[in-house]
Amino acid sequence: MQEGIMLDLAVIGGTGVYALGALADVETVEPQTSYGTPSGPIRIGTLAGKRVAFLARHGEGHSLPPHKINYRANLAALRAVGARRVLALNTVGGIGAACGPRVLACPDQLIDYTWGRIATLCEEPGSEVLHVDFGDPYTPALRRQVVAAAAQAGVALVDGGCYGATQGPRLETRAEIARMRRDGCDLVGMTGMPEAGLARELGLDYACLCIVANWAAGAGPDVEEVITLQDVLDNVAVAMAGVPRILHALLAD
Ligand code: HPA
């Protein structure tokens, strides 16, 4: 394992993103952590001349639902292999008018609606009690770099917005999405928390790049539209086309 060797970036892939195709000279590591086993192997390789790690959040065969993911093990494992900054790719539903299917967005706020997940490193008896600042849940400097990288790569990206993290694995009711809209959410996904909070507790720089797969329930022009997994995967595949260009520009910095 590459313990101690600094990586330039770790990327966590969400639904529909199970590998980074452009990663070269890939080495696979399967670190154990004091929090347990990560979702799958970590692939470490070279992208745009830099050392990059990739981890599929749901496992490479998408075997883990959002509430069963060991977010602590995932982040601790990435830290153990040398990651200090993490770009989380999150497949989401769109609520805000600018956040329709196939849009990429880099949120700057979040609201946590999840429950029953281990959301802190302070879980075990005797562990240090942490009260990390979380006013800006995403590392502002990294977020700015992602936004600048998209601009430089000529990839359209919504700069800012509020991510609402829901429990899943079911999608939301129209009333839930209407409430989230009133709360100020622009995007809805199931995996944004506790990941962002744990990254902060671990001292990792962390930003989120959302791939909008569908209008959230009742948010689009056809309010009764039924959301299918196939629509989600098709839209992610299209929107993902811009992501390698953003990564290249980000790493070239
Ligand atoms: N809601 C929650 N999570 C999601 C959605 C959604 O509509 N689409 C993709 N992930």
Image (cartoon, rainbow, N blue to C red):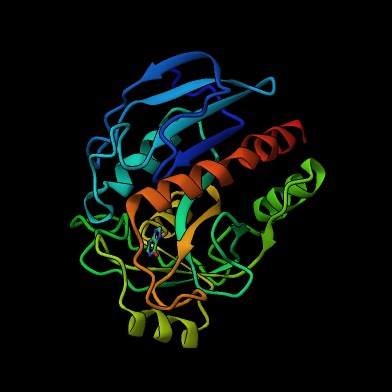
Say which of 24 and 86 sits in front: 24
Instruction: Locate residue 236 relative to residue 50 in the image: left or right.
Output: left
Residue 240, position as x, y percentages in the image: 56, 42
Q: Quadrant of the C terminus?
A: top right
Residue 168 lies left or right of residue 216; in this view the side is left
Q: How many marks?
A: 0
Residue beneath the point at 57% across and 54% down: 102
Looking at the image, the residue that sits furthest to the top is 25
Quarter of the image with the N terminus is top left
User: Viewer-proximal residue, 250 or 235?
Assistant: 235
Residue 179 place in picture, x, y as percent: 40, 86
Query: Closest to the observer: 186 or 1?
Result: 186
* Above or below for 225 versus 140: below
Q: Position of residue 232 (x, y in %)?
A: 41, 52
Q: Name the residue located 26 percent from the left edge and 29 percent from the top edge.
A: 32
Q: Position of residue 209 (x, y in %)?
A: 57, 52
Is 119 located above or below residue 84 in the figure? below
Q: Ligand 1 appears in which quadrant?
A: bottom left
Instruction: Looking at this view, name the residue that lies furthest to the left.
Output: 125
Residue at position x 52%, y 76% from top?
Answer: 221
